[in-house]
Image (spheres, grey):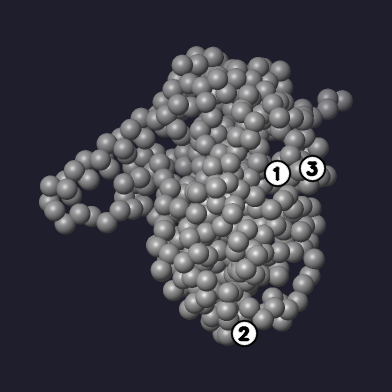
Amino acid sequence: MNMPATRRLLIIDPIFRGSRLYYSAMAAAGAFAQGWEVHILTREEAETEHYFELFEGTPVTLHRKVPLPAGFWYGKIGGEAVEALIGALVSLHKEFQFERILAAGINELNREFTDACVAHRNELRATLGRTPLVAIEYDARYLLRGLQAPRPRNPIERLRREFRVWFRRERQRQNLRSLRRAIPGLRVAILDERAFDRTLATRIGRSFLVQLPDPPPRYVGPAPLAPDASEVHDKTRVLLVGLQSKRKGIEDFTRLLQARPNLKERFQFVLCGSLVAESEPLRPKLVAARKAGLLEWVDEYLPEVEIQRRYSETDYVLLPYARDFESSSGVMANAARSGKPIVATDHGCVGYRVQRFGMGFVYPSANIAKMAEVLFSLPRPSEPEYQGLSTNCINYARNNSVDEFQRILLSA
């Protein structure tokens, strides 16, 4: 009697940390539940604290092949790493014959990666054939670049802008065509619904674009139950979570604490996360805010269950993202899962969702005065407006289910 062939999934996740690791863990869990054998192609130093928690109960085989600098956590991976990634992809597929490949966290549509794929197109085509390769794009910046800014009033400037938009769109279209020639089974799964709110997605090749829900991840266990934050604390508690950098808005947050010391009268800010190296100069100012009683700072690694407890104890989640942060956000997804309204900057995927789905309030990036104005106008948890925002957050999380995320990744 012939045994059924083993179904194998390869997840390409070289960065292997941050929100993107959650997506890899959710995909791996969904595949394993359906009887797939899961492999992950990742960085040479791959095992992090989150890995042991998020993959508990999901057996995976790690292939540590991609050389990345120590401490690298975000951005385009370099040429050497791209070459190593493509070489390992070809080698592993020859050995294991994966039924499906998921690419997460490699900025799949950037020019450097495209050029490398084109350079190896004959080898990739010969090895992968039409094996589905689903590349996750975390935002729609590549499809929408140039369309977000207001139209200039000056006719000449307006014409120049239209030309730039056209040029970028055509360059992106060529990018996608080049990738499809190198990888015929390519699908691009986008977590940012803005791409599908524009006719641009159709013009650029919607036939192989797939919209993914953006779910809050399932963790190793439920968050410990806690009383409502307003019942425990006199002040409105505002939470910031994650590794803190300029892109994540830590500089603007620090400026807020310095500019408006009267925040202490109403707010208790809770910061869970360390500073990246480039933001270390802000440490003395944050320490001063902690000593002044304005800030509670957990400057160390926290297990996921503890992070979930922090969500349950807060009133609001603050996302002061800088203008160059366009992506979806695991922090936003967790806030929605916990029913906690969000205060965010008004741009990008996060700002769009907060406004569209009524999950909180927005303000212009880097505008400290507006940031403070929004904070002081926040409804208290006992007020009906707050309850409405909380309900909208929970509904958003329910409509972006893990099950649907897994189903699309394994069938697109």
Mark 2 → mark 1, Cα distance in angstroms: 36 Å
Label 2 SS: loop
| Sequence order check, earlier mark of 2 and 3 | 3
How would you rate the neighbour count of disc 1 (Cα within 10 Å): few for under 14, some for 14-19, many for 20 or more? many
Q: Residue at x 74, y 30 (%)?
A: 62
**Gap between marks 2 and 3, in whole Å?**
38 Å
| Mark toward the start of the polypeptide (1 vs 3) | 1
Towards the viewer: 399 or 42: 42
Q: Is residue 138 above or below residue 368?
A: above
Residue depicted at x 55% and y 47%: 281
For label 2, count other residues whose C-alpha is less than 10 Å away and answer few (under 14), some (14-19) or many (20+). few
Classify mark 1: helix, strand or loop: helix
Q: Residues within 10 Å of mark 3 (few under 14, many from 20)?
A: few
Q: Nearest to the eye among marks 2 and 1: give it.
A: 2
Q: Secondary structure at mark 3?
A: helix
Give the residue at mark 3: 52
Are the two marked residues, 2 and 1, in contact with CB atoms closer than 8 angstroms?
no
In the picture of the structure, the residue carrying the numbered disc 2 is: 382
Identified at 59% across, 58% down, the residue is 286
Q: Give the number of the disc on residue 152.
A: none
Q: Is 9 drawn above or below residue 318 in the view shown?
A: above
Q: Is residue 366 above or below residue 264?
A: above
Q: Position of residue 88 (x, y in %)?
A: 64, 20
Of the two numbered discs 1 and 3 in the rendering, the one whose residue sits closer to the viewer: 3
Cα distance between the residues tagged 1 and 3: 10 Å
Res. 402 visible in picture? no
Residue 25: image tag: 1
